[in-house]
Amino acid sequence: MIKEEIKTDKAPLAIGPYSQGVRIGRFLFLSGQIPVEPASGMVVEGGITAQTRQVLKNLQSVLNEAGFRLKDVVKTTVFLKDLSCFADMNGVYGEFFSAPFPARATVEVSALPKGVEVEIDAIAVVGDE
């Protein structure tokens, strides 16, 4: 199978040796997105709710660039700076995903890039074998 880099200017560009997304066959692996508004390059203000919404918009942009949709996401990992913000993050997350929901792990971390509150990565699969 061929490994294809996915990149879009509708999500924050990779600033290191990684790709926004990598497609291999029916699978798309998305790097963690943080709440940076792509046009300005600035972190979104407004706490965990606004930041989670921007993260998911960024993930959606990478998915769309590869021809995938949110319904194709099968697994996410949510990194929270403060696990007490879980309910607020979860509320926004539920606005983007519908049943059957992706599998998910959520972990609290001591720090995230640019001091943000949340980062989310994802794996998506499209089509049948």
Image (spheres, rainbow, N blue to C red):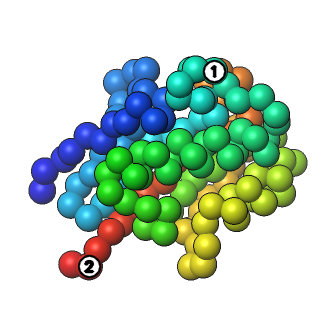
Q: Residue at x 36, y 66 (%)?
A: 125
Residue 20 drawn at (x, y percent)? 39, 37
Q: Is residue 12 above or below residue 31?
A: above
Compare residues 126 and 3 and report the one nearer the observer: 126
Neighbor class of circle 2 (other Cα within 10 Å; few <14, some 14-19, many 20+) is few
Q: How many numbered marks are there?
A: 2
Q: Is residue 52 above or below residue 125?
A: above
Residue pointed to by mark 1:
42
For the question of whether residue 46 can be seen, the reply is: yes
Residue 89 drawn at (x, y percent)? 76, 52
Residue 32 drawn at (x, y percent)? 51, 41
Compare residues 73 and 112 and report the one nearer the observer: 73
For the question of whether residue 120 can be seen, the reply is: no
> Where is the C terminus found, in terms of image quarters?
bottom left
- First of labels 2, 1 by sequence position: 1
Q: Residue at x 36, y 43 (%)?
A: 21
* Three-letter code for the amino acid on which mark 1 is drawn: Met
Local SS, label 2: loop
Q: What is the CA distance from the residue labelled 2 to the residue labelled 1?
A: 39 Å
Q: Residue at x 63, y 61 (%)?
A: 96
Local SS, label 1: strand
* Three-letter code for the amino acid on which mark 2 is drawn: Asp
Q: Residue furthest front?
A: 39
Residue pointed to by mark 2:
128
Q: Pointers 2 and 1 in contact (CB under 8 A)?
A: no
